[in-house]
Each structure stands twice: as structure tokens, then as C-alpha cells.
């Protein structure tokens, strides 16, 4: 590689004449020479001076041909920063939240959202397959992410396992689509367990109706299973998600509800129970009508698993971690990076606030 004091290829200042068809001279011979020089320079580590001597060319000519190789795509330069690797991101997450177990999933370059979701769903399905045990009761919060995980599960018989729905979904939409029921049933079938659906609305029209329903024996049975759950599995919801949350697109919330959530500073939800930037649900009126578990129950649970595959959820994920709602996090590297940027932004805002 170039030594101190040597000339290096200049940065491209215009598109390659070889690719654009410009009148500027560029012949096939030049391209062949550019490839030969690029191999000597990048693969064998020869200096431009050594290449010039070996090929009988001037050093400026070697530099120009190296520039041609880069501009036309004959050479691609990639920087592999060890600080961007999943292991480093996991260490960064643990440094900010020492109590969590984080697994960061690597992605191919330029991964689109569908690929991100597929990779994380597969990793989460594998994690669950190795951590679930016979006779466990697992609480499942439905949504796009858990639906993807349910489709990636590898069958493995686990006797007497129970999968209980954590938040209601009873609506005309779900009765017709089967979206929520299908998610729970896939979990049960994969592990030879039993699915327990929660036959109540996602949001009640009146908190008094919720109170009355909670006294029904059929509902009380599901609530008891939720309280007995050995593990809670969920994602975080966000209006900024790349793939809109099912709860925001299926008519569960009207315009007034959405306006209320915005006014009250809501940044995310877990099992359709909403929280603010500090991960607290205080002062959020819609939660009185929500069917999901109280966030204090989630916060105190020793085995909560959050699965996220969307950098648009970074703010919601940051708030959930700040509120100590997550014990295990399975997340893609793009979202993990966006999450750590949220941390940096929050820290900088705090410093500015203290200095004023």
C-alpha cells in the first residue's frame, strides 16, 4: 500500500468517460491496464512507484489509471469498521443497559425492511426454540413481528406448554382475517402446546366495561394464565415504524385516540399499552381502556423478550429500555445502531439542559 510521501490516486471529479461515452479518450487498452495496476496496488500491495517501474509507465499515468479503475467500478472499496460489528453493538447496548441480554442480528449490505424482518424473525425463532422448556406458559403479544416469528419456528415437541395471548383483539377485522389467532396457533402447533386466545376487544369503549369483563370467569382464566407466564414475548409498537403497526392500521384506534396519544407524549406501546419517553404509562388516558397487561407487571417480570426489526422503532425501543421493560432484546444491527444514536442524542440534550 502507499508509503508516506508517495502520491495516491486522486479523488474522482467527474463520471468516468469509459462509462458515459464522453469524447474524452479512454480505450480498452486503458481499462486492461487499469485492472492490471489495480491488482498490483490493492492485492499485492505494490506502491505506485514500484508499479511504474515494473510496467514502464510514469507515476502520474499509474495514478490516473487507478482513478479510472475506481470511477468505473472495476475496483470497489469497502471499509469494515469493527465498531459496527454486531458484537460491538451488543457491548454498546450492555454498557448503557447492564441488565439486558442483547443479541444483535447481522444483515447483508443494503438490506430492505423485508430482509431485516426475515433475519430477525429467524433468529428469534431459533432463540425461542432453544430457551423454551416443557410445561412453560408463554405470554405472546400479537403484531407483525410476532406473526413473522411464528412463521419461522422449527417444530419441536414440548409437552404441556401453553401460549397465552397478552392483549385482546376481538374485532370484526380479526374475526375475518384470523391474523391474531393464526399467530398463537402457529406457536402452539410448533411446540405441541395449547393456544389460549383472549376474547376481549383490544380497547374497550368504556373503562367500566373492562372492569366488568375482568370479573367474567372465562376472562379471569386467561388473566390468571398471563400472571403465571414464565416468559413474556413481544415487540414494541410505534407510529414511526417502517411497517405500520397492525393496531394502527386495522381500525382499533380512531382519529381522536391518535390525537390523544400524541398530546400525551406517547412514543410506543407493548401489547397495546402505551408509554412515554421514560417508559412510564402514567397520565396516558387510553390505557384505562386497553386490554394489555399493566406495564408494572411487565417491568417486574424476570423474563421479558423483546424482538425488534425496524429502525423506525428506535425511539420506542429506547423508551422501553429506559423504563426497564425489557430483559432480553433480539434486534437487527441497523435498529441497534439507531438505538445507540438515540442514546447519544438523549445524552447530548441532557448536557445542553444542564449547561443552560
Image (cartoon, rainbow, N blue to C red):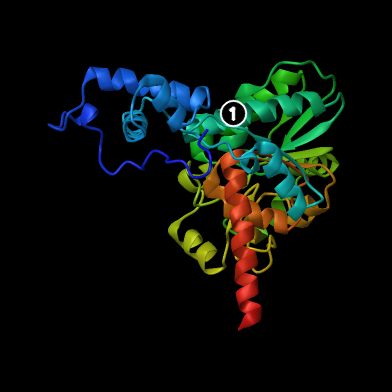
Q: Toward the viewer: 246 or 252? A: 246
**In the shown orientation, is residue 195 left or right of residue 269?**
right
Q: Residue furthest left?
A: 23
Q: Residue furthest bottom?
A: 356
Indicate the position of residue 36 as horizontal and vertical percent values. 39, 19
Indicate the position of residue 44 as horizontal and vertical percent values. 52, 22
Placement of 315 over or under 11, stated as above or below: below
Q: Is residue 303 visible?
A: yes
**What secondary structure is marked by label 1?**
helix
* Residue in the image at 69% along x and 17% along y: 154
Q: Quadrant of the C terminus?
A: bottom right
Q: Toward the viewer: 46 or 193? A: 46
Q: How many labels, in total? A: 1
Q: Is residue 215 visible?
A: no
Residue linked to disc 1: 119
Indicate the position of residue 331 as horizontal and vertical percent values. 64, 39
Q: Quadrant of residue 318?
A: bottom right
Amino acid at each position: 500500500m502507499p508509503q508516506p510521501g508517495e502520491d495516491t490516486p486522486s479523488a474522482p471529479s467527474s463520471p468516468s468517460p469509459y462509462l458515459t461515452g464522453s469524447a474524452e479518450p479512454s480505450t480498452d487498452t486503458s481499462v486492461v491496464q487499469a485492472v492490471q495496476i489495480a491488482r498490483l496496488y490493492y492485492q499485492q500491495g505494490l506502491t505506485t512507484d514500484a508499479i511504474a517501474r515494473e510496467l514502464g509507465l510514469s507515476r502520474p499515468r499509474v495514478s490516473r489509471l487507478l482513478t479510472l479503475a475506481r470511477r468505473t467500478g472495476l475496483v470497489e472499496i469497502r471499509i469494515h469498521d469493527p465498531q459496527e460489528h454486531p458484537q460491538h453493538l451488543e457491548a454498546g447496548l450492555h454498557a448503557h443497559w447492564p441488565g439486558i441480554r442483547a443479541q444483535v442480528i447481522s444483515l447483508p449490505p443494503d438490506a430492505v425492511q423485508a430482509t431485516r424482518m426475515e433475519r430477525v424473525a429467524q433468529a428469534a425463532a431459533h432463540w425461542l426454540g432453544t430457551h423454551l422448556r416443557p410445561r412453560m406458559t408463554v405470554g405472546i403479544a400479537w403484531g407483525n413481528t410476532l406473526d413473522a416469528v411464528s412463521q419461522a419456528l422449527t417444530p419441536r415437541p414440548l409437552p404441556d406448554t401453553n401460549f397465552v395471548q397478552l392483549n385482546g383483539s376481538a374485532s370484526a377485522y380479526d374475526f375475518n382475517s384470523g391474523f391474531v389467532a393464526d399467530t398463537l396457533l402457529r406457536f402452539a402447533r410448533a411446540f405441541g402446546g395449547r393456544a389460549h386466545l383472549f376474547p376481549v376487544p383490544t380497547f374497550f369503549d368504556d373503562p367500566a366495561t373492562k372492569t366488568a369483563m375482568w370479573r367474567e370467569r372465562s376472562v379471569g382464566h386467561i388473566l390468571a394464565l398471563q400472571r403465571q407466564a414464565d416468559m413474556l414475548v413481544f415487540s414494541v409498537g410505534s407510529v414511526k415504524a417502517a411497517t405500520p403497526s397492525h393496531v394502527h392500521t386495522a381500525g382499533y384506534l380512531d382519529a381522536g385516540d391518535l390525537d390523544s396519544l400524541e398530546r400525551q407524549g406517547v412514543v410506543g406501546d407493548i401489547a397495546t399499552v402505551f408509554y412515554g419517553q421514560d417508559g412510564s404509562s402514567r397520565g396516558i388516558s387510553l390505557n384505562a381502556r386497553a386490554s394489555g397487561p399493566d406495564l408494572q407487571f411487565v417491568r417486574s417480570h424476570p423474563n421479558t423478550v423483546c424482538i425488534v426489526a425496524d429502525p423506525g422503532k428506535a425511539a420506542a425501543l429506547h423508551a422501553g429500555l429506559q423504563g426497564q421493560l425489557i430483559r432480553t432484546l433480539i434486534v437487527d444491527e441497523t435498529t441497534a445502531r439507531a438505538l445507540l444514536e438515540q442514546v447519544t442524542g438523549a445524552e447530548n440534550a441532557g448536557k445542553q439542559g444542564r449547561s443552560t
